[in-house]
Image (cartoon, rainbow, N blue to C red):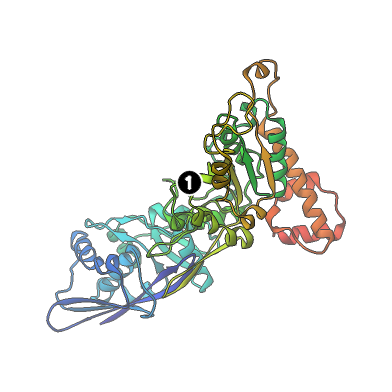
Amino acid sequence: MLAITNSIALQGLEGVIVKVEVDVSSGLPGFDLVGLPDAAVRESKERVRAAIKNSGFDFPVKRITVNLAPADIRKEGPVYDLPIAIGILAASGQVDPNSCTEYTLIGELSLDGAIRKVNGALPAALAAKYHSYNKMIVPSANAGEAALVQELKIYPAGSLSMLVKFLNGEQNLNPYTVNVKELLDSSSHKLLDFADVKGQLSARRALEVAAAGGHNVFMLGPPGSGKTMLARRLPGILPDLTFEEAVEVTKVYSLAGQLQPNEALVTKRPFRAPHHSASTASLVGGGRIPMPGEISLAHHGVLFLDEILEFRKDVLESLRQPLEDGLVTITRVQSSITYPSKIMLVASANPCPCGYYGDSTKECSCTPNQIQRYRRKLSGPLLDRIDLHIEVSRVKFSDLEGIEPSETSSAVKVRVEKARCIQRERYIENGSVLCNAQLPPSLVRKYCTVTPEAKKLLRTAFK
């Protein structure tokens, strides 16, 4: 008997519908899995066999052939465990075959029949919606992120036995829903505050300007001048993510398996600070199975390269195209995958190898050749992509004693949001929409005074 279930194959952030065709026929017992599977998919045979038996169902002692179509797309990961198991049960008469075709299924099976969390549930749900499917079964742990696609009915399944009862009409399984507004408002992640920074008025002002315009920043100064402290407080003055931006960021984190437990939506702008020993693949993405790198994980947020002159030159040069285009394309023999990379690059460096060139308190011990060789790692084209260059000088302790408390991040953030609204108004007047300065309609109404035609365009942009 033949049974067909539906699943999703992810190629980067894009998804393709996979038909899992299962044939159970007479003959010598065997289990063949075809359709260009990788090692994790081939190993699903043993997981599926044990899960079916330990869930109280009969594993057919017959000739089983599973085809993952289309056969020319490589299938990767354990997401096909669940559709393969349901297909075998349907082909052997233990599940209603007609009910299986209504849903797309993803999920990894444990040996006891529990359904485990998988990576990429949100991109898979978006792909199912794009291909006109309106029902999807996902592991319970993935239900929150998948339910962000509100035009799709998401059914969370905790075990294989529960799912079989649902498909046979013996048990009810309610669609999972999320309140997007509550998700955006309920983040408990506390950001570092600019009030902790005393002095450095010019650097603080420069970072405020950078946040208002989405500019890249380069900070140069001796050790202990506060470059890292300033950079880590930059996300606190950036406007909040819109829902569309949050979904884009969550897609990348879901695919990379970096969503925190019980985190359905990334609600704060990312801040990524890779070590200077990072490779090109870890920074821009890559690997045998091309995965997003740090520049994509910082999408709509901040990528902080501390001690940028300690990074390898070839690693830094790989940033040139992503900074220019807001996209990074990873090309392999079999495929080409594109990930988003709209980021604010914040870099910091010492002025010389010893760090004290131009310092007022300690003399530099480097030769001119050493300084020139040290700074040569940053090429002209890369520096051209960094808009603001800031000299961060050391602040003496005696000067700090009389300084009043610094302005808080929330006060600075208000000015940044107002500046971005003014930008949006300017771009609307010119007949275009500024995509990198999106703000919620409440802030637009609060800060912008625009014509009725512009307001109509704003409503359309945020619809």
| Above or below: residue 258 compared with residue 326 | above
Which residue position holds label 1? 274
Say which element carries label 1.
loop
The residue depicted at 34 percent of the width and 60 percent of the height is 171
Side of 91 relative to 374 (left or right): left
Q: Looking at this view, is 91 or 36 the one in front?
A: 36
Report the amino acid beneath label 1. Pro
Kindly give the residue lying farthest to the right in the view shown: 451
Side of 21 relative to 433 (left or right): left
Q: Looking at this view, is 82 or 120 the one in front?
A: 120
The residue depicted at 73 percent of the width and 43 percent of the height is 209
Q: Looking at this view, is 444 or 88 the one in front?
A: 444
Side of 375 relative to 156 (left or right): right
| Above or below: residue 8 compared with residue 261 | below
Residue 345 picture location, percent across and down: 60, 49
How busy is the neighbourhood of tag 1: few (under 14 within 10 Å), some, or many (20 plus)? some
Q: Looking at this view, is 105 or 308 the one in front?
A: 308
| Above or below: residue 125 compared with residue 380 | below
Q: Is residue 177 visible?
A: no
Which quarter of the rendered picture does the N terminus lie within? bottom left
Residue 108 picture location, percent across and down: 32, 60
Residue 232 picture location, percent across and down: 57, 37
Q: Count all numbered tags in the image, as a single digit.
A: 1
| Image quadrant assignment for residue 27 | bottom left
The residue depicted at 81 percent of the width and 59 percent of the height is 428
Which quarter of the rendered picture does the C terminus lie within? bottom right
Residue 311 picture location, percent across and down: 49, 48
| Above or below: residue 434 compared with residue 236 | below
